[in-house]
Amino acid sequence: MTDDRLRVLIVDDERPARQKVRRFLAADGEIEAVYEAPDGLRALEIIRDESPDLVFLDVQMPGLDGFGVAEALDPDVRPHIVFVTAFDQYAVRAFDVHAVDYLVKPFDEARFRKALARAKAAQASRTARGERARVRGLLEDVQSHRPTMPDRLLVDAGDRMVLLPLDRIDRIEAAKNYLRIHAGRDCFRLRRTISGLEDRLDPARFVRISRSEIVNVARIANLEPWFHGDRIVVLTDGTKTRLSRRYRDRLDHFAP
């Protein structure tokens, strides 16, 4: 362990659970600061503003769960994570392989000390690349245990993160390393590939029309012919965007 003191964030929607972790941390002289978040959105704000070294992250929370928080973090600045879970045995095996450590509720102080020691060792060795790989692997392994078709997306509104209902989305546009999410007059940002998001959306509600764009089927007003077999998709707000030949069969059954 280096001489660096740890800044720790506790994320749990239950106040007694946060108090329990805070009480265990209070007995450790190597803890510099402790922050608390009652939900995933607040956790992301604190991580952005305070840059904690370590996060005790509850998996099961309403709104944005622990995996949603982990997915939303920039992998280049992601803190070390100790997941707190009541998941089934398959998920626990995934934690065994990928996480710095995990705590299964209810846990005692001895088990907490073991998790904290592992997190300190990871912090001391500065294995940021290994931590990023572990969390990516964990998210991939447990993906099948989470809903594959969300009803909201966690998006960047500039000064805050918001949960955007899918019904509000008009279209999704690739922009370098990000996606632009167009919803009426609002435009949000999401750090994800367009193919990765396409796999999680209901194909009956959202259709990919080109390499760089997905549209909400409910927003399609008309299709117009274009050059070389392409077509123009006209949305209900008047926006026009190109439907490429490669993806034209996705709208074969569309009847405006």
Image (cartoon, helix red, strand yellow):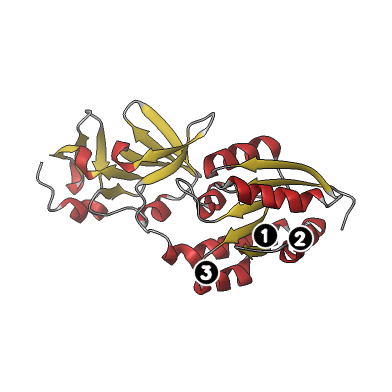
Front-most of 209 and 62? 62
Answer yes or no: is residue 28 visible: yes
Q: Position of residue 169 (x, y in %)?
A: 32, 38
The residue identified by callout 2 is 122
The residue identified by callout 1 is 131
The residue identified by callout 3 is 91
* Callout 1–callout 2 Cβ contact below 8 Å: yes
Q: Position of residue 55 (x, y in %)?
A: 67, 50
Q: CA distance from mark 1 to mark 2?
A: 8 Å
Q: Position of residue 106 (x, y in %)?
A: 61, 63
Q: Residue at x 22, y 53 (%)?
A: 204
Q: Is residue 82 above or below residue 181?
A: below
Q: Which mark is residue 47?
A: none
96 left or right of 225? right
SS at mark 2? Answer: helix
Answer yes or no: is residue 77 visible: no
202 left or right of 61? left
Q: Amino acid at mark 3?
A: Ala
Q: Residue at x 57, y 42 (%)?
A: 38
- Judged from this view, the residue extending furthest toward the left is 255
Quadrant (top left/top right/bottom left/bottom right) for the C terminus: top left
Q: CA distance from mark 2 to mark 3?
A: 22 Å
Q: CA distance from mark 3 to mark 1?
A: 18 Å
Q: Amino acid at mark 1?
A: Glu
154 left or right of 103? left
- Judged from this view, the residue extending furthest toward the top is 185
